[in-house]
Amino acid sequence: MKRALRVAALGFTAVLSACQMVGPDYQLPKDGAINRPDLQGELAGRSVNTVS
């Protein structure tokens, strides 16, 4: 039980440290894939009929 709690605490600390690195003022790069019209298109599976 103590080991699981310790692992969970370390995982939580790692997640928080990753958020700290990015910070609340993160800006998408102007040349990022999300901003490039040549990379925007339909998802590969969208043209295939699927049943869920």
Image (cartoon, rainbow, N blue to C red):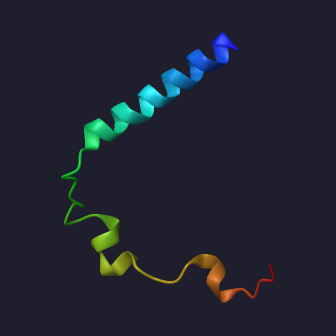
**Nearest to the observer: residue 23 or residue 2:** 2
In the image, 52 versus 30, the foreground residue is 52
Q: For the image shown, how many numbered marks are present on the structure?
A: 0
Residue 47 falls in image quadrant: bottom right
Please, which residue is most extreme toward the top here?
2
Vertical side of 11 occupied by 45: above or below: below
For the N terminus, give its image quadrant. Answer: top right
Drawn side of residue 11 relative to residue 31, left or right:
right
Quarter of the figure with residue 6: top right
Residue at 43% in and 35% down: 15
Write the residue at 28% across / 73% down.
Answer: 35
Q: Residue furthest right?
A: 51
Between 9 and 40, the one lying in front of the other is: 9
Q: Is residue 22 above or below residue 8?
A: below
Of 46 and 16, the residue lying toward us: 16
**Quarter location, residue 7:** top right
Residue 3: x %, y % from top left:
65, 12
Could you tell me residue 18's position as x and y percent? 36, 36
Residue occupying the point 32% across, 81% down: 37
Q: Where's the C terminus, which quadrant?
A: bottom right
As displayed, is residue 21 above or below residue 11?
below
Residue 52 is left or right of residue 3, and the answer is right
